[in-house]
Amino acid sequence: MNRQTVMENSMVPSTCARPIELYVFIDPLCEDCWSLQPLLRKLQLEYDRYFTLRIALRTSLPSMNLPCIQKNEDALACDKVHPTYPIIAVKAAEFQGKRAGLRFLSKVFEYSFLKSRNVSSFSVLVEIAEKLELDVDEFIRDFSSKNVLRSLQVDVYMAKEMEVDKAATFVFFNGNIEDEGLKVSGLYEYEVYEQILEELVGMTIIPDIPPPLEDLFQRFDVLATNEIADIYNISEKSAERELKKRLLQQYIERITFQDTTLWRKKQL
């Protein structure tokens, strides 16, 4: 799991701006990966200046069988439901920008685990692209392109080189390109990742002050009440009070799924 080999073969650019490189392998159909989102967001908010983040897709399927793409057929002409569709769709969304890919991944989790929608359905994935106001025609073209296949193959290669056999998995690399990466599989308490980051940096790391609430909703599309409370280190009651103020100002809107309350910037 030598980083130099991975970087050279996957053509992922290295960076010297931050001392740590963090690869996070995520499966859009994995419930643990959905639960990982708040932790990863907080890590970015507090320690973003210490690491460069790369999200890679790791499917739980026994093999990467992408029949539609391999034949370069239009996705609409293929089976309309397939277990590989979610990871293909995330990659297709990424072609409209890194943030578009992350937003799409977040929405896939929302549709799957909160709305109980079948995200292996092509029509549902197109619906998500529409909801996020992506260029839907471009999304459909990219979905069935060879470029998506090549991008997915890079992620598969990295997972193999880093010996990642499941999602969710973190792989940390320090500033020495010859050192092995530190792999952390599964989901742990936030403090575990803080400690690893500090040990790899080799000095005490100081968390950044969280941004104003309005800026938070500019960066992340949908947030839960308890997640916001955790970010600002306040009680859920206090967080809800602040959120209701923004609700009255019509800056944000509330979305309720069963016993879960989510908040997002009000859509015009």
Image (cartoon, rainbow, N blue to C red):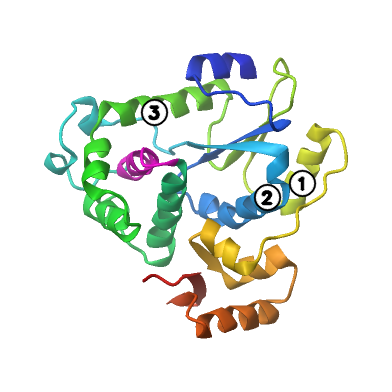
Residue 161, position as x, y percentages in the image: 55, 20
Secondary structure beneath label 2: helix
Q: What residue type is labelled 3?
A: Ser
Determine if the magenta segment contains residue 86.
yes
Residue 88's quadrant in the figure? top left
Residue indicated by mark 2: 43
Determine if the magenta segment contains residue 239.
no
Q: What stretch is highlighted in magenta?
A: 84-97
* Residue sitting nearer the eye, 8 or 242: 242
Q: Residue 151 carries which label?
A: 3
Q: Height in image: 229 above or below 36? A: below
Residues packed near mark 1 inside 10 Å, few (<14), some (14 to 19) or many (20 plus):
some
Q: What residue type is labelled 2?
A: Leu
Quick check: marks 2 and 1 in contact, CB under 8 Å?
yes
Question: Does residue 12 appear in this view?
Answer: yes
Residue 130, position as x, y percentages in the image: 28, 57
Q: Mark 2 or 1 closer to N-term?
A: 2
Picture residue at 52% right of the left edge, 85% below the top: 248
Q: What residue type is labelled 1?
A: Glu
Picture residue at 58% right of the left edge, 67% below the top: 214
Residues packed near mark 2 inside 10 Å, few (<14), some (14 to 19) or many (20 plus):
some
